[in-house]
Image (cartoon, rainbow, N blue to C red):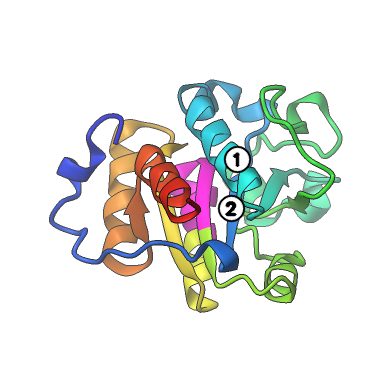
């Protein structure tokens, strides 16, 4: 698991499961130019997940965080951070390393959760999705909040430890522990890709 996150959270990973390929969606959270420095270490793993999901016809959803007018749609995020991503700016765009297919979905959001005031839940249900695999940034903000929101909507959540990145290692591991305890199955890129490939032989 990259930096051996499994060892660091072993006391909390007492549940194991694998996503059902035919009922799964991959959520690629906020891999935008604004977060390029954070996402750089995980780009390769995120691309591996996208490639294996695309090869297996698994639904892929990209999210972009942005604000049309931070004074009107910034809410507590604006008060908390003050520096927000402006919708349509260069920093709002997805990083160049990612390729979005015409079959993929892009969800624009302005809160941590990809479910808040978006059509994500309806879109997933319309496609028969019951399991979500989460990757992207930031582990401890948008990824974790989306994972928790997915859980309370009764999706099984699979959180990819080495394809998510937080503000720092301490916060990343803390989120993994919280999620493993109460919300998500913590998995790694290599094992998930191997599992998907093996089950499709």
Label 1 near label 2: C-beta < 8 Å?
A: yes
> Where in the figure is residue 160, as x and y percent of width and height?
42, 46
Counting residues from the N terminus, which is met first, the one under dot 2 or under dot 1? 2
Q: Which residue is mark 2?
A: 26
Mark 2, other Cα within 10 Å: few <14 / some 14–19 / many ≥20: many
On whether residue 183 falls in the magenta region, the answer is no
Quadrant that contains the N terminus: top left
Spatial CA distance of label 2 from label 1 is 8 Å
Q: Residue at x 43, y 58 (%)?
A: 158
| Badge 1 element | helix
Using residue 25 as the reference point, say whether residue 201 is left or right of it: left
Q: Which residue is mark 1?
A: 50
On whether residue 142 falls in the magenta region, the answer is yes
- Residue sitting nearer the eye, 69 or 133: 133
Using residue 10 as the reference point, say whether residue 165 is left or right of it: right
Res 87 label: none
> Where in the figure is residue 16, as x and y percent of width and height?
27, 64
- What residue span does the magenta drawing correspond to? 133-146
């Amino acid at each position: 698991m990259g930096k051996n996150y499994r060892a660091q959270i072993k006391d909390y990973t007492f549940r194991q499961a694998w996503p059902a390929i035919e009922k799964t969606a991959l959520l690629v959270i906020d891999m935008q130019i604004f977060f390029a420095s954070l996402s750089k270490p995980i780009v390769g793993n995120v691309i591996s997940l996208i490639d294996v999901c695309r090869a297996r016809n698994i639904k892929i959803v990209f999210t972009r965080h942005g604000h049309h007018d931070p004074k009107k749609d910034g809410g507590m995020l604006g008060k908390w951070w003050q520096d927000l991503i402006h919708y349509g700016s260069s920093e709002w765009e997805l990083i160049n390393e990612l390729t979005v297919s015409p079959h993929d979905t892009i969800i624009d959001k302005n809160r941590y959760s990809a479910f808040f005031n978006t059509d994500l839940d309806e879109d997933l249900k319309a496609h028969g999705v019951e399991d979500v695999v989460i990757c992207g940034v930031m582990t401890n903000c948008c990824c974790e909040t989306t994972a928790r929101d997915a859980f309370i909507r009764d999706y099984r959540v699979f959180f990819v430890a080495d394809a998510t990145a937080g503000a720092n290692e301490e916060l990343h591991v803390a989120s993994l522990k919280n999620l493993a305890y109460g919300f998500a199955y913590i998995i790694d890129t290599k094992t998930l890709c191997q599992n998907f490939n093996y089950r499709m032989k």
